């Protein structure tokens, strides 16, 4: 993560404690060792791979004589570097300020110092003006950001609603950061979404209409990657992603099967989904990066043990056909199959069957057009008046 933030790691310490020290997190003796090693290595910044209380962070920073960053702050810094759109920037600023608020002490703040030129992180922090702000001002800024985000969210909901009127089934790509969601999005949708081995490459969701070789059509969204113990206020800030995920008809969970800890990552994503209140949606599990795996037997076993799963390489395209078939299968299961005789004057309904559904059979009869079609439940309602048993 530190490297993803653009930092050069010059030294590492691994510590075991039964309980975090309330004052320094790592214990006073360890804090003194950190100071020595910071001096030796000439480090600008110390990163602790867990979350610190504001007091621990302050004390440790005093002991080390350099800035101390905890896990959440590091993630926030990566987010700040990745944010590209206005909404992305609003989300990151909101999350940073929420993190900052309990850490404001009137003697300057950790967050603002990173944003400045002092630290080793070249990021866009909340900005210099925040340095002088008191809690009240931060709170009012948080309120203003929330309002701005509300507007953006409302605007998108309008878009989503008109998208829903098309009644094409929608799916969200979800998964651990760097699992290959954007790479898969590009492969399926022919998009040009940025894919990179850096963490959290994607911050803003992208949605495209995708056709699976004429067999089925869906609206596919690429979303922000998840992470083990994703801090809660970060989740709250990423409403755009949340909405895509909670509003999708089904999810495509991309797992980097070549990763040493892919099982843990798999579980972490399921946990985050649970926290987001996403339950009961159909999930397709894609074991990705098969090109990096030698043991194909293991992959097959994984797929066999997981419902609605396939393995593939978003990089080489291997296994793409299986995924496409799986997607059409899941969509098919969500659709209603109807047989109807549509009167000749209702050509609009016939056109709808062809545009939005999958016509399995069609025949011109004297009393109308016989169709057998798979179509979403909402559209099926329009045809049921002409349905035959
Ligand atoms: N070898 C191999 N590399 C892959 C495959 N899929 C993705 N990658 C690489 O994995 C890295 C991460 O891919 P992304 O598509 O950016 O991953 P992501 O899930 O969108 O990541 P975030 O946006 O950070 O959540 C990139 O360097 C990709 O080129 C694959 O099937 N095989
Ligand atoms: Mg991505």
Image (cartoon, helix red, strand yellow):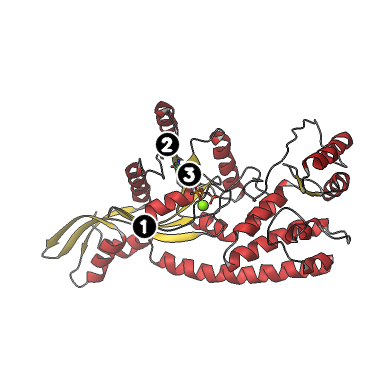
* Residue 84 showing in the rendered view: yes
Quarter of the image with the N terminus in it: top right
- Label 3 beta carbon less than 8 Å to ligand 1: yes
- Residue at point 12% right, 62% down? 365
Q: Nearer the viewer, mark 2 or mark 3?
A: 2
- Judged from the image, the secondary structure of the residue bearing numbered disc 2 is helix
Residue highlighted by disc 3:
254
Please indicate whether residue 56 sits to the left or right of residue 247 in the image. Answer: right
Task: Quadrant for residue 13, please give it.
Answer: top right
Label 3, residues with CA under 10 Å away: few <14, some 14-19, many ≥20: many
Measured along the vertical axis of the image, is residue 60 above or below residue 292? below
Residue highlighted by disc 1:
210
Q: Looking at the image, is mark 3 or mark 1 earlier in the sequence?
A: 1
Q: Looking at the image, is mark 1 or mark 2 earlier in the sequence?
A: 1
* Residue 25 showing in the rendered view: no
Please indicate whether residue 283 sits to the left or right of residue 374 in the image. Answer: right
Image location (x, y in percent) of residue 145: 68, 68
Say which of 82 and 329 sits in front: 82
Q: Marks 2 and 3, Cα distance to the nearest angstrom?
A: 12 Å
Q: Marks 3 and 1, Cα distance to the nearest angstrom?
A: 17 Å
Residue highlighted by disc 2:
290
Label 1, residues with CA under 10 Å away: few <14, some 14-19, many ≥20: some
Image location (x, y in percent) of residue 12: 73, 36
- Judged from the image, the secondary structure of the residue bearing numbered disc 3 is strand
Q: Nearer the viewer, mark 1 or mark 2?
A: 2
Image location (x, y in percent) of residue 260: 55, 32
- Judged from the image, the secondary structure of the residue bearing numbered disc 1 is strand
Image location (x, y in percent) of residue 318: 35, 41
- Label 2 beta carbon less than 8 Å to ligand 1: yes
């Amino acid at each position: 993560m530190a490297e993803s933030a653009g930092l050069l790691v010059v030294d590492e310490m691994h510590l075991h404690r039964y309980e975090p020290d309330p004052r320094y997190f790592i214990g006073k003796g360890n804090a003194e060792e950190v100071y020595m090693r910071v001096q030796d290595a000439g480090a600008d910044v110390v990163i602790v791979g867990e979350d610190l209380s504001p007091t621990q962070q302050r004390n440790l920073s005093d002991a080390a004589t350099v800035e101390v960053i905890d896990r959440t702050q590091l993630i926030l810094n990566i987010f700040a570097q990745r944010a590209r759109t206005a909404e992305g920037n609003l989300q990151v600023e909101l999350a940073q300020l929420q993190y900052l608020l309990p850490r404001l002490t009137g003697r300057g703040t950790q967050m603002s110092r990173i944003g400045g030129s002092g630290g080793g992180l070249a990021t866009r922090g909340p900005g210099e003006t925040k340095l002088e702000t008191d809690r009240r001002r931060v709170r009012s800024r948080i309120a203003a950001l929330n309002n701005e985000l509300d507007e953006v969210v409302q605007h998108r909901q309008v878009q989503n609603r008109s998208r829903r009127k098309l009644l094409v089934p929608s799916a969200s790509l979800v998964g651990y950061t760097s699992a290959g969601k954007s790479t898969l999005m590009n492969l399926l949708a022919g998009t040009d979404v940025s894919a990179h081995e850096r963490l959290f490459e994607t911050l803003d969701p992208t949605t495209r209409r995708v056709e699976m070789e004429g067999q089925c059509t869906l609206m596919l969204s690429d979303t922000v990657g998840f992470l083990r113990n994703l801090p809660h206020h970060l989740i709250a800030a990423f409403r755009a992603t949340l909405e895509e995920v909670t509003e999708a008809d089904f999810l495509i969970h991309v797992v980097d099967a070549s990763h040493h800890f892919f099982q843990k990552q798999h579980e972490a994503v399921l946990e985050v989904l649970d926290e987001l209140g996403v339950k009961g949606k159909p999930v397709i599990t894609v074991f990705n990066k098969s090109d990096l795996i030698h043991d194909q037997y293991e992959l097959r076993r994984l797929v066999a043990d997981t419902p609605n799963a396939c393995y593939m390489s978003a990089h080489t395209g291997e296994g793409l056909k299986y995924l496409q078939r799986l997607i059409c299968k899941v969509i098919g299961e969500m659709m209603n199959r109807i047989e109807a005789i549509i009167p000749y004057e209702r050509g609009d309904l016939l056109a709808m069957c062809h545009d939005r559904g999958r016509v399995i059979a069609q025949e011109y009869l004297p009393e109308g057009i016989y169709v057998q079609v798979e179509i979403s439940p909402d559209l099926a309602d329009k045809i049921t008046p002409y349905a035959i048993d």
